[in-house]
Amino acid sequence: MARVQNITGTGRRKSATARVYIKKSKEGKIVVNGREFTQFFPRKTSQLIIRQPLELTERLNSYEFKVNVSGGGASGQAGAVRLGIARALLKVEPELRATLKKAGFLTRDARKVERKKPGRHKARKSTQFSKR
């Protein structure tokens, strides 16, 4: 009996991490932390972000995705899931690389919140300057 190979893609954004498991399917379901992704991400913008690599490559109903996501907020988690889905798709179909790369879905967004500095109100905001 042939062993089923687990194909995964890992995505990170801000402090969120997503592990994406991909499986060939006709349904095209995306399950995030045991719930349908439309329930887990109620905002339409988050749902759009997650679907982007699938719509671009026209693979909306070709694969089933099981996602475990932790850390960060809703926006960071959506970005992490998008990167994970793009990387998982790439492992299954390497010929999609040029399309995904051109759209920027294979690039990890390295932006994070800058830390607060001592003597300042926030990361960069300083106290009001008085000349006299």
Image: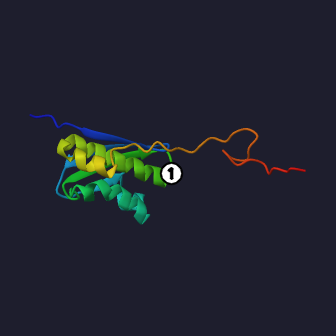
| Residue 36 shows in the view | no
**Where does residue 91 sit, x and y in percent of width and height?**
23, 40
Disc 1: CA contacts within 10 A as few (<14), some (14-19) or many (>=20): few
**Where does residue 131 sit, x and y in percent of width and height?**
86, 50
Placement of the N terminus among the 4 image quadrants = top left
Q: In the image, is 106 to the left or to the right of 57?
A: right
**Where does residue 108 sit, x and y in percent of width and height?**
40, 42
Give the residue at x 44% y 64%: 43
Q: Residue tagged by mark 1?
A: 73
Give the residue at x 41% y 65%: 44
- Using the rendered view, name the quadrant where residue 8 is placed: top left
Element assignment for label 1: loop
- Residue most toward the left? 1
- Residue most toward the front? 131
Give the residue at x 27% y 49%: 100
Q: In the image, is 107 to the left or to the right of 59?
A: right
Indicate how the structure is coloured in the image. Answer: rainbow
| 2 and 62: which is toward the camera | 62
**Where does residue 54 sit, x and y in percent of width and height?**
26, 55
Q: In the image, is 66 to the left or to the right of 15?
A: left
Give the residue at x 50% y 47%: 72
| Residue 41 shows in the view | yes
Amino acid on which the number 1 mark rests in the picture? Gly
| 74 and 68: which is toward the camera | 74
**In this figure, what is the number of numbered marks?**
1
- Residue most toward the right? 132
